[in-house]
Image (cartoon, rainbow, N blue to C red):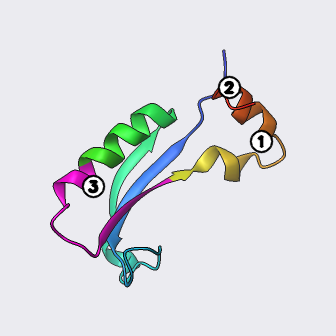
Amino acid sequence: MDKPLLHLVFGGTVSDPQGTDFIDPDDLDIIGIFPNNNSATKAWRGASQARVDEANVKYVIVHLHRMLDPDHPAEFLERRGES
């Protein structure tokens, strides 16, 4: 069985909507950790759309699997169909 490709979804108020400088890290909205990109994207989309009227609130997906095992990026791309 393949290892899950863990993804973290979180958001908060940013100083610039085009960047990722979160103003108050203590006030981040942690949505959760997800086993694959599809479920993370679904959670990210739901959280982002719920706050769409707040221009300085941004949600992001962090590919934890790339941080946890940086020596094997080709394996991750292959499993996602990007090789």
**At 64% from the left edge and 44% from the top edge, which residue is drawn?**
65
Query: Residue 79 bears which disc, if any?
Result: 2
Task: Say few, some or many: other residues with alpha carbon within 10 Å of mark 1 (under 14 / 14 to 19 / 20 or more).
Answer: few
Q: CA distance from mark 2 to mark 1?
A: 10 Å
Indicate the quadrant where residue 2 lies.
Answer: top right
- Image location (x, y in percent) of residue 50: 17, 54
Q: Quick check: 49 left or right of 36?
A: left
Extent of the magenta region: 47-61
For mark 3, what is the residue? Answer: 48
User: Between 77 and 33, which is closer to the camera in this rendering?
Assistant: 77
Mark 3 or mark 2, earlier in chain: 3
Q: Quadrant where the C terminus lies?
A: top right
**Do the residues bearing badges 3 and 2 touch, measured as CB atoms within 8 Å?**
no
Task: Say few, some or many: other residues with alpha carbon within 10 Å of mark 3 (under 14 / 14 to 19 / 20 or more).
Answer: some
Residue 37 drawn in magenta: no
**Do the residues bearing badges 1 and 3 touch, measured as CB atoms within 8 Å?**
no
Task: Say few, some or many: other residues with alpha carbon within 10 Å of mark 2 (under 14 / 14 to 19 / 20 or more).
Answer: few
Please name the amino acid that badge 1 sits on: Pro
